[in-house]
Image (cartoon, rainbow, N blue to C red):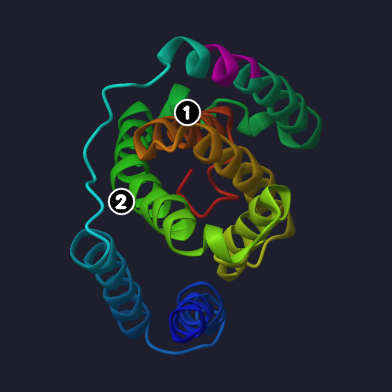
Amino acid sequence: MKVRAYKVLEGLILFVVIPLSFMINYSIWLKLGLGVIGFLYVVYVLTVVEKLPLNISKHLNWHLFLKQTLIKFLLIALLTTFFIWFTNKELLFFVVLNKPKLWLMILFIYTVFSVYPQEILYRTFFFYRYETLVKSKIGFVLLNAALFTLGHLFFKNNLVLVLTFIGGLLFAGTYQKTRSTLLVSIEHTIYGCWLFTVGMGNILGFPS
């Protein structure tokens, strides 16, 4: 009972209190510090307390993963291309065509410093620590997606929240099936990098 209560409190602090605090106007350095401390805590719990190896599994179904990801990507690419075309077609592929160096820099920073840490926190850690606390698998995926969306409230953009919730459902579903941080990080990277490429980078807080 004490372990369960501790995990609930831990989850509230990491996934609700800290993200909501980023909505308050205070020092950006303090916010960065809270984020770093929280992430270091997560890594400590995974590697020292839970002793969960963060190595790459040798038994991954790459064929199925790539097939499913390709189908989802094509649908996302089609919908987002039409969205940019009809809302502001001047942004369509603007950065990759006009500022290729900036585009490459954005993709690198996003992949290394955003995607992988997010997947360690919201999928690897979240599933390992809290999955047994929720009986419904669908309910757990919805909870994960909702908290993933909550973590992006600081953008103060409704479209970002919609995209994040959809992404959260996709990533949680992938992790639930594969239990692979690597695969879900690759999927996250593909979709996220496409959004920057197609012309939605400014919406997601990146320069365009």
- The residue lying at 45 percent from left, 48 percent from top is 207
Q: Residue furthest left?
A: 48
- The residue lying at 50 percent from left, 75 percent from top is 11
SS of the residue under disc 1: helix
Closer to the camera, 24 or 43?
A: 43
Residue 125: x and y, percent?
Answer: 40, 58
Q: Image height check: is 8 above or below 177?
A: below
The label on residue 190 is: 1
- The residue lying at 40 percent from left, 37 percent from top is 185
Among numbered discs 2 and 1, the one appearing first in the sequence:
2
Q: Residue 108 occupies which quadrant of the picture?
A: top left
Closer to the camera, 107 or 66?
A: 66
| Callout 2 amino acid | Phe
Q: Residue furthest front?
A: 1
Residue 86: x and y, percent?
Answer: 81, 30
Residue 13: x and y, percent?
Answer: 48, 82
Q: Is residue 76 visible?
A: yes
Residue 89 in the figure: left or right of residue 189: right
Residue 39: x and y, percent?
Answer: 31, 67
Q: Identify residue for label 2.
A: 113
Main SS of the magenta part reads helix
SS of the residue under disc 2: helix
Closer to the camera, 75 or 177?
A: 177
Residue 17 in the figure: left or right of residue 136: left
| Callout 1 amino acid | Ile
Q: Image height check: is 5 above or below 106?
A: below
Q: Image height check: is 67 above or below 101?
A: above
Q: How many marks?
A: 2
Q: Which span of residues is magenta-colored?
A: 67-71
Within-10-Å neighbours for mark 2: few <14, some 14–19, many 20+: few
